[in-house]
Image (cartoon, rainbow, N blue to C red):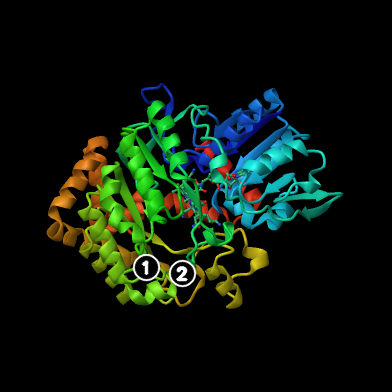
């Protein structure tokens, strides 16, 4: 059977430069490849099906082109894959357009957001036939075998005789080694590695991709829904299977890989075996991971560095213990300090800190502590995002109980916590405290870690014009004169804050308004 899979996202986030091509002749896109659909494509092809993939990050395949391909190829199933609340509006638009032009198409949605909101999505999007929940590998095969009557397909939400049917959940698959290596080469796009994670600072021009070696994270942080998606479990692939994938990537010419695992730094034995395998097989690919600071794996940081691990990103969140406890991070400031120092001492080239600002019960003093703490740590890069709340997370449940969100009306909306929670600082105050914090962080970094600052700048300059670096770095210091961007500071600028805010706003408008807005953007 023939399947078309589309990775849906806000296209303006990703295209590097209009029409920019890499050495392969493919369009270059800054960001992460759509490993979800690439994983499904490999599974489908192995089972003898045909699969064609599209990624909305590609400026050369706008929705019209995708619809043209659907008309031409007449697929048995069209799967739209998207990650989060912010891409849901784009998924709706595309699905409606497909339904209008190809009335008999079989349309499916999948991904984390669709999984966690399956009933609501099915009700809001009657033009989508199937909402696929959880892991998609076996599900999509089962669905293709039962397209006419999917009553026995576990993990599916669909409609029969106008009534929504929520088939039972699929048992969480633990045998991840059974799945083939993702089909990375069929999508004619080259991905460029940017500063962690989706910020517009190019880190390397080598062929870049992502890999997933484990799924899930068992910790109960109040802002995260990963434990729900994975039923609180952590599942992993064997070291042998990870090495086999590395060998394939090396042959395909990849120079750098980022692991999209929710928490890579678990199970020392597996990590040791992965690192030893990389060294033994002479694999030269550089790689990066994310993990918690309380990981017991830290004694392996030197081995990881030897095996070409060059990026470790920690979820630090705050420099105030009070806020860490409020977010139920179950980590201490001391653990953070030790982990960052250990990673640097071991020779990890880039150690990144994810921070959040605008948390419940956070005051200006807590924010000051966060920036002071960040300055003291030998971090190479950092990001300070505004805390947001997603449906399904413990924080969402708390907000429902406190009457701050309405589960029936607000489920698809994207809220910065400060917009709805009176215990948060007000948005403009958070922004100005963040601007101040970043300015002082910059100065402190210059004095406390001058060599590190210098190497960071040198790294930026390797692939970016000096003018762009200047614009980026001077932002926090330009103050009110810089007009609309006056509240913007480095982290906001580099993290696409404007675009993120626009994307977030789009989740709150009606479908009609949304279409009008998209039309306006297209006509600009
Ligand atoms: C890497 C990543 C990113 C990357 C982008 C990756 C990309 N390809 O574009 C970056 C950094 C850019 C990013 C951005 C954002 N992200 Co993010 N991201 C992730 C992360 C860590 C991994 C995603 C991944 O690659 N998974 C691996 C692949 C194999 O899995 P998958 O895509 O889920 O696909 C599987 C199934 O879902 C299913 N499936 C998927 N599609 C389909 C379709 C069909 C038809 C079928 C049958 C099955 C199916 O089958 C696949 C194989 O099993 C996840 C956490 C997670 N574990 O999911 C967060 C996560 C998805 N992100 C999240 C968020 C909030 C965001 C942002 C909104 C953050 C922000 N404020 O900007 C943006 C939104 C981006 C967007 N356009 O939607 C949240 C979503 C929460 C929610 N409920 O909505 C998550 C869950 C993190 C979290 N802890 O809460 N993200």
Label 2 SS? helix
Q: Is residue 7 visible?
A: yes
Residue 509: image quadrant is bottom right
The percent coordinates of residue 459 (x first, y second) are: 22, 42
Label 1 SS? helix
Indicate if the residue with disc 2 has its beta carbon within 8 Å of ligand 1: no
Q: Are marks 2 and 1 in contact (CB under 8 Å)?
A: yes
Q: How many marks?
A: 2
Q: Residues within 10 Å of mark 1 (few under 14, many from 20)?
A: many
Residue to which mark 1 is pinned: 430
In which quadrant will I find the N terminus? Answer: top right
Residue at 28%, 59% in the rendered image: 480
Residue at 62%, 53% in the rendered image: 172
Distance, label 2 to label 1, CA atoms, is 9 Å
Residue 66: image quadrant is top right
Q: Earlier in the sequence, mark 2 or mark 1?
A: 2
Residue at 41%, 21% in the rendered image: 25
In-image side of 147 versus 449 (left or right): right
The percent coordinates of residue 202 (x first, y second) are: 32, 39
Indicate if the residue with disc 1 has its beta carbon within 8 Å of ligand 1: no
Please determine whether, in this image, residue 492 is positioned above or below residue 467.
below
Residue 273's tag is none
Residue 518: image quadrant is top right
The percent coordinates of residue 9 (x first, y second) are: 53, 43
Q: Is residue 354 visible?
A: no
Residue 418's tag is 2
């Amino acid at each position: 059977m023939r399947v078309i899979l589309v990775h849906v996202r806000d296209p303006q986030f990703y295209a590097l430069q209009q029409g920019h091509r890499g050495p392969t002749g493919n369009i270059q896109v800054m960001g992460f490849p759509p490993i979800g659909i690439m994983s499904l494509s490999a599974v489908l092809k192995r089972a003898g099906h045909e699969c064609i993939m599209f990624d909305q990050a590609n400026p050369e395949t706008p929705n019209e082109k995708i619809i043209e391909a659907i008309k031409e190829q007449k697929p048995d199933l069209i799967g739209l894959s998207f990650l989060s609340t912010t891409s849901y509006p784009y998924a709706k638009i595309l699905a409606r357009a497909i339904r209008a032009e190809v009335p008999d198409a079989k349309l499916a949605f999948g991904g984390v957001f669709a999984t966690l909101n399956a009933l609501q999505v099915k009700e809001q999007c009657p033009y989508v036939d199937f909402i696929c929940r959880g892991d998609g590998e076996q599900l999509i095969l089962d669905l293709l075998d039962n397209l006419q009557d999917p009553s026995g397909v576990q993990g599916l939400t669909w409609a029969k005789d106008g009534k929504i049917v929520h088939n039972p959940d699929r048992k969480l698959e633990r045998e991840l080694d059974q799945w083939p290596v993702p089909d990375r080469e069929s999508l004619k796009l080259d991905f460029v590695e940017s500063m962690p994670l989706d910020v517009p600072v190019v880190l390397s021009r080598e062929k870049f991709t992502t890999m997933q070696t484990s799924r899930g994270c068992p910790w109960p942080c109040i802002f995260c829904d990963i434990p729900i998606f994975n039923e609180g479990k952590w599942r992993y692939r064997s070291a042998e299977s990870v090495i086999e994938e590395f060998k394939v990537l090396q042959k395909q010419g990849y120079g750098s890989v980022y692991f999209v695992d929710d928490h890579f730094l678990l199970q020392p034995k597996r990590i040791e075996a992965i690192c030893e395998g990389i060294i033994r097989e002479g694999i030269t690919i550089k790689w990066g991971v994310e993990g918690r600071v309380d990981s017991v794996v830290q004694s392996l940081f030197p081995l990881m560095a030897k095996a070409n691990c060059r990026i470790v990103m920690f979820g630090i969140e705050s420099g105030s213990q009070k806020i860490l406890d409020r977010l139920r991070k179950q980590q201490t400031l001391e653990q953070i300090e030790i982990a960052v120092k250990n990673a640097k001492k071991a020779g990890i080239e880039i150690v990144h800190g994810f921070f959040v600002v605008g948390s419940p019960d956070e005051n200006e003093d807590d924010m000051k502590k966060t920036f002071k703490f960040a300055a003291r740590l030998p971090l190479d890069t950092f990001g300070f995002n505004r805390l947001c709340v997603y449906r399904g997370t413990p924080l969402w449940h708390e907000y429902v109980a406190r009457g701050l969100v309405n589960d029936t009306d607000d489920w698809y909306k994207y809220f910065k916590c400060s917009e709805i929670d009176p215990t948060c600082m007000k948005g403009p105050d958070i922004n100005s405290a963040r601007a101040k914090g970043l300015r002082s962080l910059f100065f402190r970094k210059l004095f406390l870690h001058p060599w590190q600052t210098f190497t960071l700048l040198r790294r930026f300059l390797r692939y970016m014009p000096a003018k762009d670096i200047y614009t980026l770095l001077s932002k926090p210091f330009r103050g009110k004169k810089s007009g609309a961007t006056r509240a913007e500071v480095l982290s906001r600028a580099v993290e696409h804050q404007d675009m993120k805010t626009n994307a977030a706003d789009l989740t709150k408008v009606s479908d009609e308004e949304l279409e009008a807005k998209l039309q306006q953007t297209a006509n600009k």
